[in-house]
Amino acid sequence: MSLLDEILRHPARGCLLDREGIMRLLPHRPPFLMLDRVTAIEPSLVVAEKEVAASESCFEGHFPGNPVFPGALQIEAMAQAMALAMLFADESFLGGRPVFMGVEKCRFRLPVVPDCLLTVRAELKRLRGSVGVCETEILLGGELASNAVLHAMMKP
């Protein structure tokens, strides 16, 4: 049985994969785990969510009195969704370590502020060997907040 089949057979409450399930697949840990749940999985697409809490430490300095969720952390959330998309595309990557290789065409369109829910989408466009290219985006209330084309590889 494939990983995708196993997850779909035993979904977490209210989602396909919760934080605990994500941590079984990715090496990231809080406070740098940027995804809270996976809500959809298709052969080349992962849709996840991130709850941006006012208590997150990044808001202490970015920016006091006018908190904005940093663009670098948005890219990290997109990269983690991409890593999951790569895992579901090729289960031989299980146990491997995703390595971020590059970002292209990155745009930040809306400010992401505390106490909002982000939808993070990663669509795998190309996978050659262990290297993938993914179109990613973050939606805020259905509107495009940021997007980028990401490149990553899976190391054994």
Image: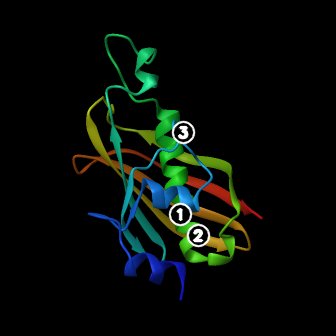
Residue drawn at x 37%, y 25% is 68
The label on residue 32 is 3
Earlier in the chain: of badge 2 and badge 3, it is: 3
Say above or below: 20 vs 7.
above
Residue drawn at x 53%, y 34% is 72
Residue drawn at x 57%, y 62% is 25
Q: The residue under label 3 is which amino acid type?
A: Phe
Would you say the residues marked 2 and 3 are in contact, meaning their CB atoms lie under 8 Å apart? no
Give the Cα separation between the discs numbered 1 and 3: 15 Å
Question: How many marks do you count on the picture?
Answer: 3
Residue 19 located left or right of residue 40: right
Q: Residues within 10 Å of mark 3 (few under 14, many from 20)?
A: few
Residue 74 located left or right of residue 53: right
**Quadrant of the drawing holding the C terminus:** bottom right
Residue drawn at x 43%, y 53% is 19
SS at badge 2:
helix
The label on residue 84 is 1
Q: The residue under label 2 is which amino acid type?
A: Leu
- For this orientation, the residue located farthest to the top is 65
The label on residue 87 is 2
